[in-house]
Image (cartoon, rainbow, N blue to C red):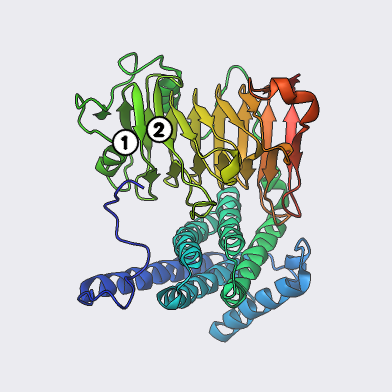
Amino acid sequence: MAPSTQDPLLPPHPSIKKPFPYSKTIFLLLLSVASLISLAALFFSYKHTTSTTAPTVNFSHLCSRSPDQASCNVVVSNAVAALSAQSKTRPVPAQVLLTIIQQSIREIDATVSELTTIHRSANDRRLRSSLADCVHLMGLSRDRLVDSAAAVSCGAHTDAQTWLSAALTNHVTCSDGLDGPLSRSVKVYLEPLTESASASLAVITTMNPHELDKVTRLTRKIPFPEWVTARDRKLLEAASVGSGMTANVTVAADGSGDFGTVQEAVNSAPNKGKARYVIYVKAGTYKENVAVGKSKTNVMIVGDGMNSTVITGSLNVVDGSTTFNSATLAAVADGFILQDICVENTAGPEKHQAVALRVGADRSVINRCRVDGYQDTLYAHSLRQFYRDSLISGTVDFIFGNAAVVIQNCDIVARLPLSNQKNTITAQGRTDPNQNTATSIQSCKVVPGADLVPAESATPTFLGRPWKQYSRTVFIAIVHR
């Protein structure tokens, strides 16, 4: 992968002698304390403004929508007990939910500590890679829980449900990536996290079920989701850089730009940026693995066309990568936009899982792009995503994940798999009925690729399979052969 300016996810192995990072440890400790203090402030603010007027609900009813009511009741009872120890006033559902979230954050912190200890002593390369993924995912979940608490306190329940859904998806992804002799002992630490996340989703859907059932419709007059700003719509409708779009930095393989690699340009973006930061990547082929980390918010990467600007990689599971970390381009920063670019993974069908594009960025848009691979091409991992006027190709489960994703006006191309394989276009990963996630494929063309056409009659291609217990995929107005 391309070098990163970020600190490593895990501390170095004990055999590598380095000075103990006192300042960093103190900073992280203060950050954790500050997050919990902020949550406590939100909780007490909600308590003082609502406890005397808000209606009460039977606490067992808060778990009525849970797929595991026994587990949910335990989580809710623990939260109620904690609240009762602080005040004699009967708590309202929002206070119960905030308490569960607070407890979940503490559980994540404890789990990260345990996983770090196991990572230090693990000798198996694959396990170490999976644990690194888990630590990364735990960090993302922690941030989403903090955001969810703020959303609950201000009544933004749809946002809270979205972020809680993502936290649960992160926990499941961590668990799915673990195998080998130590996997069971590691998964023990994940079970309380998944139970708390599931209980949180059950509570929030019980609190306000009608609000969470609202659906936003896309029309020709409003071709993008409502969360795409008017300014971003102009960028998405621009024909190219210079035509209604100005780039902040330029990437050029021939040295004529500000940077020679896409990763360098991403690293140059401001952390927690509020304004749109446009990275223009000139025509050419860029062999690198690009990571748009969570701090690089509101980044837009735009090329010279889906057949002209290519970011290419070949990481895969057979050669030692995890599925999660095999992506040629991975984006987890909110507000991410990708336009007029090809992202590909060239590992081939014999290398099995090999992701081209992984997106876990909330309110992200992929427009006029090409995403090429074989197995697991597009990993629409989590949160709200929108794909339009793009091409996605692959063989097995080549559109998968647990995002709330709409894929519209795209070409979906099935390629030739291995001789013992069958093509499946989608594998949706919803594990809880209260997650507001699904894959919606609208007004797309589903066609065989040039390599599949001669073998089409002998190679079945299915629209999808139920990867997880509550998988949910919809195909609407599809043109197919």
Measure how far apart labels 2 and 1 are at the Cα level: 8 Å
Front residue of 80/132: it is 132
Amino acid at pointer 2: Ile
Total labels: the figure holds 2
Front residue of 330/210: it is 330
Amino acid at pointer 1: Val
What percent of the width, then of the height, locates residue 211? 67, 46
What percent of the width, then of the height, locates residue 193? 59, 70
Between marks 2 and 1 in the image, the one whose residue lies nearer the viewer: 2
- The tag on residue 262 is 1
Q: Residues within 10 Å of mark 2 (few under 14, many from 20)?
A: many
The answer to whether the residue labelled 2 contacts the one labelled 1, judged by CB atoms less than 8 Å apart, is yes
What percent of the width, then of the height, locates residue 394? 61, 33
Q: Secondary structure at mark 2?
A: strand
Q: Residues within 10 Å of mark 1 (few under 14, many from 20)?
A: many
Q: Secondary structure at mark 1?
A: helix
Q: Is residue 117 left or right of residue 182?
A: left
- Residue at x 35%, y 32% (from the top left corner): 286
Above or below for 185 versus 265: below
- The mark that comes first in sequence, 2 or 1, is 1
Question: Residue 23's quadrant in the figure?
Answer: bottom left
Q: Which residue is mark 2?
A: 311
Answer yes or no: is residue 132 visible. Answer: yes
Front residue of 356/26: it is 356
Front residue of 418/429: it is 418
- Residue at x 40%, y 19% (from the top left corner): 308
Above or below for 4 versus 419: below
- Residue at x 68%, y 25% (from the top left corner): 452
- Residue at x 55%, y 58% (from the top left corner): 170
Question: Residue 175's quadrant in the figure?
Answer: bottom right
